[in-house]
Amino acid sequence: MEVRWLEAFVAVAEELHFGRAATRLHMAQSPLSQTVRKLEKDIGVPLFERNTRSVALTAAGRSLLPHAYRALEELEVARQAAHASVGTVYGHLTIGFTGAINHRTLPVLTRVLRRRFPDIALSLQGRVVTGDAVAQLQQGTLDLAFVGLPLDPSPLESRLIAREPLGAVVPVDHPLANSVRLDLGALRDEDFIAMPAGRGSDLERTTTAACVAAGFRPRVVQEIGDPFMILTLVAAGVGVSLVSEGMSEILPHGAVYVPLADPQPYLRHGLAWSPSNPSKVLRVVLDVASEVLPTPS
């Protein structure tokens, strides 16, 4: 039995489609089918039920799958151990982030990691709001996430990495566009563009809380899960929004950022991870993060 046979089997078992599995493995479909048949011949039982329209695991295939996962995982551990023995940090890390909100922090971390530890493979997952990040960290589908703080009570660990004031973004031809500072109450009758409510977005939560503290609830006419698209819709004249001060650096043409008058609401940016995650790569990344994204005083 060869490792590539198991890799082919797992790909087909997960995709249940030889064409998609072949694309995933960067090979043609015919050699993939031959590889799977070699594994079936070696084991002595069929692993898939095939017809012209579908592919399904047999009982033997379902029994083999968890063992195939473990075999491939053990092989990866062996590779990492071999690299570690010569001082190389080797492995994979999945990082979740929201989007444009993290444009000051995410690149700082990833640039240093790629320079110092080129054998760490980073998988970056965008449009992951805080609520989703918490769930995925607990499930183990994310290793590290950029989140808004504070988090609701959870078994996760987190650390503050930045604190940014919220400001208003208005169309360039808005009557308040030339204001030096803006009283938030002046926006009570405006149409707002915001992150979707109930999805766990810290930007949406902080925006709503700030408006309520100013004596009104924002009248949201458009919800959108991409922070940069919020800026784009403001530039298009659809409405106004509240965003972190750092996003003023990436405004599209047609939108203006106006700081808010005191008392200013703040977004508190953080990193979160699960303390039960056994990844040695995560510990290395957290050490780098503490250096390049220190907790503000």
Image (tube, helix red, strand yellow):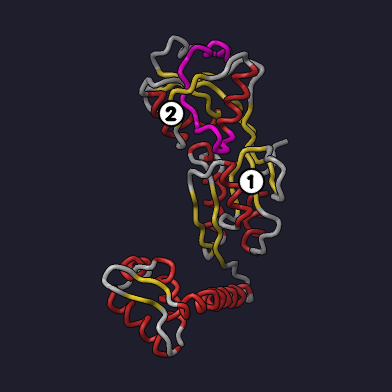
Q: Could you tell me if residue 210 is visible in this image? A: yes
As rendered, which of 175 and 139 lies closer to the eye?
A: 139
Q: Is residue 206 above or below residue 149?
A: above
Where disc 2 sits, the SS reads helix
- Label 2 close to label 1 by CB (< 8 Å): no
Indicate the position of residue 107 as horizontal and vertical percent values.
52, 46
| Mark 1: few/some/many CA within 10 Å (<14, 14-19, 20+) | many
Give the quadrant of the C terminus.
Answer: top right
Query: Along the horizontal axis of the image, is 151 left or right of 15?
Result: right
Q: Position of residue 132 (x, y in %)?
A: 56, 45
Residue occupying image coordinates x 45% and y 73%: 10
- Vertical comparison of 30 with 121: above or below: below
Front one among 1 and 267:
1
Residue 66 in the image: x percent, y percent? 54, 74
What amino acid does circle 2 point to?
Answer: Leu
Mark 2 neighbour density, 10 Å: few (under 14) some (14–19) many (20 or more): many
Q: How many marks?
A: 2
Name the residue located 45 percent from the left edge and 14 percent from the top edge: 177
Between the C-alphas of marks 2 and 1, the distance is 24 Å
Report the side of 65 relative to 48 (left or right).
Answer: right
Residue 216 within the segment the image draws in magenta = no
Q: Which residue is rendered at x = 51% and y = 40% of the image? A: 103
Instruction: Please state which amino acid type lies under the numbered disc 1.
Output: Leu
Badge 1 marks a residue whose secondary structure is: strand
Q: Which mark is residue 271?
A: 1
Counting residues from the start of the chain, the first of labels 2 and 1 encountered is 2
Q: Quadrant of residue 199?
A: top right
- The magenta span reads 179-202
- Magenta stretch, overall SS: loop
For the point 60% across and 42% down, which residue is it? 147
Look at mark 2 in the image and give the residue it sits on: 231
